[in-house]
Amino acid sequence: MTETIEELQSLPRQELIQKWKKLFKTNSPQHARKEFLIKHIVWELQAKKQGGYSAQTKKQLDKLAEKLAKKQDVNENDVKETCRQSSVFEIKSGTKLIREYKGEKHEVIALDKGFKYKDKFYKSLSAIANEITGTRWNGKIFFGVKSA
């Protein structure tokens, strides 16, 4: 996926818009920035390759869609519940997490029970983030898997 990201970053915005249209079968948002297009194209490519949303997230989205289809009100609590459950993000085995820190790119591979970074096994992303930065970090926040 790293090569794909680098390839997309080298493309002009207009080519990214064409890739968006081909991939999503719809036009991209009119004023979308290049970074936005790349982020969503990469996510979609990765989702197609590795399966996309978790079963739990799909279930929550289906519940919201069902309420909307029945023309029931979707209130703030429904959305909060969906967001709360979606924030419990499960990283699938084989997922590659990439983070640039102080000009250096760091790649982590998710395994069934842990993570691989620079040919070493780690139980958590936090341990890797701590090794990279030298300070305590929440690994999911450091690698952008979870918002702060």
Image (spheres, grey):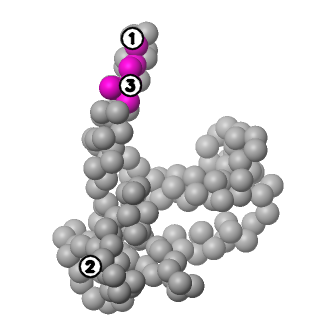
Nearer-N-terminus badge (1/2): 1
Q: Residue 93: horizontal and vertical position, in percent? A: 29, 66
Residue 20 vs 74, above or below: the answer is below
Q: Residue at x 38, y 47 (%)?
A: 53
Q: Which residue is mark 3?
A: 76
Q: Which residue is mark 1?
A: 72
Element type where label 2 sits in the image: helix
Residue 91 appearing in the image: yes
Element type where label 1 sits in the image: loop
Q: Residue at x 33, y 73 (%)?
A: 137
Kind of residue at badge 2: Ala
Alpha-carbon span between mark 1 and mark 2? 45 Å
Is residue 107 rendered magenta in the image?
no
Q: Residue 119: horizontal and vertical position, in percent? A: 32, 89
Kind of residue at badge 1: Gln
Q: Residue at x 38, y 64 (%)?
A: 141
Q: Which residue is mark 2?
A: 127
Quarter occupied by the C terminus: bottom left
**Label 1 crowd (10 A; few <14 / some 14-19 / many >=20):** few
Residue 86 vs 99, above or below: the answer is above
Residue 41 appearing in the image: no
In depth, the one of 35 and 2 nearer the eye is 35
Mark 1 or 2: in front is: 2
Q: Residue 74: horizontal and vertical position, in percent? A: 40, 19
In depth, the one of 147 and 120 nearer the eye is 147
Is residue 76 rendered magenta in the image?
yes
Which residues are drawn in magenta? 73-79
